[in-house]
Amino acid sequence: MSKDIALNSLGFAKRPEETRVVVAMSGGVDSSVVAAELKKQGYDVVGVTLQLYDHGAALAKKGACCAGQDIHDARRVAEEMGFPHYVLDYENTFREAVIEEFADAYLAGATPVPCIRCNERVKFKDLLETARDLDADCMATGHYIQRKMGAHGPELHSAADPNRDQSYFLFSTTPEQLAFLRFPLGHLASKAETRALAAEHGLAVADKPDSQDICFVPNGNYASVIEKLRPGAADPGEIVDMAGNVLGQHRGVIHYTIGQRRGLGIGGLGDPLYVVKLDADNRRVIVGPKEALSTRIVPVREINWLGDAPFDSRAEWHLSVKIRSTRPPRAAIVRPLSATTAEVELLDPEEGVSPGQACVFYEPEGTRIFGGGWIWKG
């Protein structure tokens, strides 16, 4: 291809109609707008939707993705805009790669983030391979995050709209995946702009509500899902203080999370008590004062590094880190222990740090994401 041809909006030196892009379509407004916009720009668009769990269960749940009504909505958008659409059955893959680990992590007293594992193990792995098999030049998604070209190749950056930013859920995107992925919505100032684009295209999903909670968890009831997957998981046990004194009984470790104060059923004991640790092996919920939740040192493993120099080429990195999706990044010193493990020192202690959550690395002053890893012990 001649170097004289200008790069198109997806970064290829060829005309849009010669550029095939697979769009991962969940049936929601975001991915639908991505597909419609790219089709309007003249690209060779192929829509792909993953069926991730049982249709029957999904039809009864509004606001989920990747099943039932959402597959119908994605197919309808493809028909309206005139591009091919395929539905791939990934139920077994999703159960093995995401749901089973989710259940095991909860039983072990961790607080997992299955949306990250789904991106990492299903959408950006198997689906991305399918896109390559379809001879696509790239794969586009409706995630709110930005991909920018830097001196050393593509970089991951936070979305322009901080209220929609999904960088916490995409930290494990590898450099190889990033080279193939595109995020056309990351530069938009607000979700209102996305809905306006959907209306402009006449899409039936323009006013469709955003998906809520975890797609395979009806009404946010984690415990009921885990009880079905792991019978006996809700066995009762003891609530104890940090010295091991029994304060009461609980109805199953899976009903509790680090930092929880309400619903413990041990009121009238003076100062408020919080869940500070879950001992799943001994079926114990350990409670303590609020200050016992403060954590300064956070062990992190399975690190995916997106910096230019190797992660373990320095003794320490001064970065900002986010240890929960709902909290802002805060200053930290990240000390590599190997290429994939580190000790993270928070300059100001954080409450409620929980194994199973992600620790995501950010540029201290700026928008670049340097990857992250998994918090693995309390």
Image (cartoon, grey):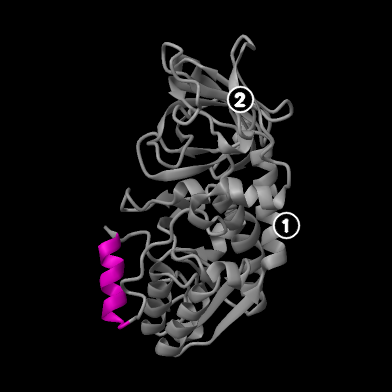
Determine which of the numbered discs, if any, sits on residue 247 in the image.
none
Q: Residue at x 50, y 26 (%)?
A: 265
Q: Quadrant of the C terminus?
A: top right
- Give the image quarter of residue 255: top right
Looking at the image, residue 283 lies above or below residue 58: above
Judge whether residue 195 is colored magenta: yes
Q: Residue at x 47, y 53 (%)?
A: 213
- Give the main secondary structure, helix, strand or loop, of the magenta stretch: helix
Label 2: few (<14), some (14–19) or many (≥20) C-alpha neighbours in 10 Å: some
Q: Amino acid at mark 2?
A: Gln
Residue 117, percent across and down? Answer: 61, 51
Looking at the image, residue 262 lies above or below residue 149: above
Looking at the image, residue 318 lies above or below residue 17: above
Q: Residue at x 54, y 33 (%)?
A: 257
Numbered disc in front, either 2 or 1: 2
Q: Which residues lie in the magenta part?
A: 191-202
Q: How many marks?
A: 2
Residue 180, percent across and down? Answer: 56, 65
Looking at the image, residue 225 lies above or below residue 12: above
In the depicted view, which residue is nearer to us: 280 or 79? 280
Label 1: few (<14), some (14–19) or many (≥20) C-alpha neighbours in 10 Å: few
In the depicted view, which residue is nearer to us: 64 or 12? 64
Query: Can you identify the residue that label 1 sits on?
Result: 96
Residue 201, percent across and down? Answer: 31, 82
Judge whether residue 22 is colored magenta: no
Q: Is residue 15 visible?
A: no
Q: Amino acid at mark 1?
A: Glu
Give left or right: position of 212 versus 301. Answer: left
Query: Can you identify the residue that label 2 sits on?
Result: 249
Question: SS at mark 2?
Answer: strand
